[in-house]
Image (cartoon, rainbow, N blue to C red):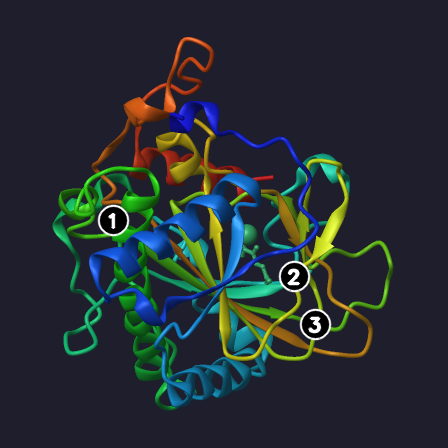
Amino acid sequence: MSLASSVSATAFNAIPIIDLSQANGSNDQRKALALQIQKACIDVGFFYIENHGIPQPIIINILSAIQAYFALPLETKMKLHHKTTPNFKGYSPLLDANIDPAAGTQGDLHEGFELGWERLDSNADSKRKNDGVMTGSNLWPDEPAGFREAMLGYYHAAIAVGEVLFPLFALALELPERYFDDKTKNSAAIMRTIHYPPQNNPKDVGIGAHTDFECFTILYQQSNVQALQVLNADKKWINAPPIDGTLVINIGDQLARWTNDVFKSTVHRAINVPGVERYSIPLFFGTDYDVDIQPIPSCVSTERPAKYEAITAGEYVKQRLEAMYNH
Ligand SMILES: O=C(O)CCC(=O)C(=O)O
Ligand SMILES: [Fe+2]
């Protein structure tokens, strides 16, 4: 059966957990893993990964760094407002973003700090060559001490997870395992750290219903607070609670475009609860920004013609980010 005819219309009720410990195992082990990923991407568009390899101290470090950062006075944080950069790097205050303007809310009830690729051992001006329309350096606050190291420490560990996943996605798409290698030499990878204040008004949303923009998202969510929800084909919100020791992976629109929607970029939102703070850290992982997103031939058929025009990954992300902040 070709991938183009494997599209699922069944509504999921649970999000699978996939164990990555065999990701660098034998051919057979990698293929078996890719099949689990294929099923999760066709049926749900979301899955948890366990044994992802990010050491716990790196997670603890970034969590305490972002808690200290978001606790700074608003005036201090506003000095690094993302509108002072060409491409959304830096701080965004509460309600600055509105990812679902049609919902008629006052905006998304979270503040964020966003960064892109940067080597830990170089200065903040280091840029990469292929960022095209998405070029631009990161901004770094003077405090808290160790913030840059904590952020980049986690960032590079999460990128390593993305680099393990891309070949598995290629196998899941019945492509050569190294298919994405020449398209991910300078992989686009925007990371956001998000602080959701306690939500006391039932009308508030932490982040409105949306799909992500890149190929896939690697999401750390703080323990013990249920907020993330994923929309199934029956329009029912399914909870995606934090599960200790796991990360959430979800397909974004770029991979949906590569696969002509055979892999689902599933709508999700986060609704925080009264009385508690919540922190989450999505890293949006994509191909190089200058790569043209063209549907993979096995995902196109006479019954399932190509749905999307080709566009470069960078143009696509920029359009989506502009729409999110210029509501
Ligand atoms: O905070 C979360 O759990 C989800 C965040 C999210 O969906 C996003 O930033 O795209
Ligand atoms: Fe998202």
The numbered mark, 3 or 1, whose residue comes first in the sequence reads 1
Percent from the top left, x then y, of residue 89?
A: 38, 59
**Image quadrant in which the N terminus is located:** top left
The residue beneath circle 3 is 197
Task: Report if the beta carbon of the residue with label 2 is closer than 8 angstroms to ligand 1.
Answer: yes
Return the residue at label 2.
240
Residue 169 spot, x, y in % from top left: 33, 47
Kindly identify the residue that appears in the image at 20 percent across and 47 percent down: 177
In front of the other: label 2 or label 1?
2
Q: Which type of secondary structure does the marked residue at label 2 adopt?
A: loop
Q: Amino acid at mark 2?
A: Ala
* Residue 4 at x, y percent in the picture: 42, 24
The number of discs equals: 3
Residue, disc 1: 135
- Residue neighbourhood size for the residue with mark 1, other residues' Cα within 10 Å, grouped as few (<14), some (14–19), many (≥20): some
Location of the C terminus (image quadrant):
top right
